[in-house]
Image (cartoon, rainbow, N blue to C red):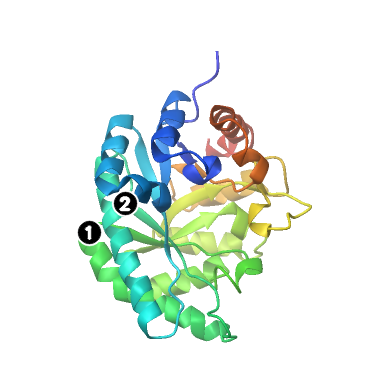
Amino acid sequence: MTPRPHPRLSLNQATIKHASLAEALDVARGAGYRSFGAWREPVAEVGLARAAELVRASGLRISSLCRAGFFTAQPGAAREKALDDNRRAIDETAVLAAAGAPGSRAVLVLVAGGLPEGDRDLVGARARAAEAIAALAAEAAAAGVTLAIEPMHPIFAADRGVVSTLGQALDIAEAVGPEIGVVVDTYHVWWDPELPAQLARAGASGRIASYQVCDWVTPLSADTLLSRGYMGNGHVDFARITRLVADAGYGGDIEVEVFRQEIWDAPYADVAARVAAAFDQAVAPALG
């Protein structure tokens, strides 16, 4: 008999990227998961009202909604468009969390975005991201949504995420207000020598809104974004990082978010089972 997945394990939809929302929820529920990390694109495919119905029928908790952000553009039409999209994402997060089972978290994951075309001012782009988060903070708080800044590995600073370290994410969060959180994603932060101190800092102010796990696998793929793998297949010390996150006071769901082509191409149920087994081996022992 296949063991039931760990009660804090959440299947992030990105791990079974090609599944529809209905399929992904069915896979998670069928595999015995209790929690699910949603993505906006599959929600948009069916519409928010239908997505909420599917979540409600699944009986699963929602651990987060990925993703919004991408607001580093200079002032103008493109920036206003990005802010409007983030406002819609705030509404989507609130609706899906309300539809989820008790314990669902209204957490909206924010990826800052990279450098605008032709722009080399990394500091300025990061400042504009901070300004955008500040502009959205009151609306998110009114909706009961936590804006969670996800730092990305520096390899993505040019095209995806100008916020590269947990320390930078916390700098922004602390400057904006107590309602802003951070995402700790092992793929993006495992290398950081300041990680223990910054996790303690995040814990002291209760800002860890999401913990995501997957491995850093070498050799890197041609598309570095797809160099993730199942926990235990790469270089991340999950026991150490998970203990640090636990010591920082985070007790919520833990999402497995893997971007890798051969995993996306595998049968969804097989992936869900592999995720649960890898979690039990690499992550769960550190949870106590």
Q: Are marks 1 and 2 in contact (CB under 8 Å)?
A: yes
Marks 1 and 2, Cα distance to the nearest angstrom? Answer: 9 Å
Query: Residue 51: x and y, percent?
Result: 31, 42
Say the numbered circle drawn on residue 171: none
Rendered image quadrant of residue 189: bottom right
Residue at 39% x, 52% y is 40
Residue at 46% x, 77% y is 72
Dot 1 corresponds to which residue? 143
Dot 2 corresponds to which residue? 106
Rendered image quadrant of residue 141: bottom left
Query: Residue 259: x and y, percent?
Result: 60, 48
Query: Residue 170: x and y, percent?
Result: 46, 69
Which amino acid type corresponds to the residue marked 1 in the rendered image?
Ala
Residue at 39% x, 45% y is 63
Disc 1 or 2, which lies upstream in sequence? 2
Q: Is residue 72 left or right of residue 244?
A: left
Mark 2 surroundings: few (<14), some (14-19) or many (≥20) residues within 10 A: many
Mark 1 surroundings: few (<14), some (14-19) or many (≥20) residues within 10 A: some
Work out which residue is located at the far front of the displayed protein and give it.
45
Residue at 29% x, 54% y is 92
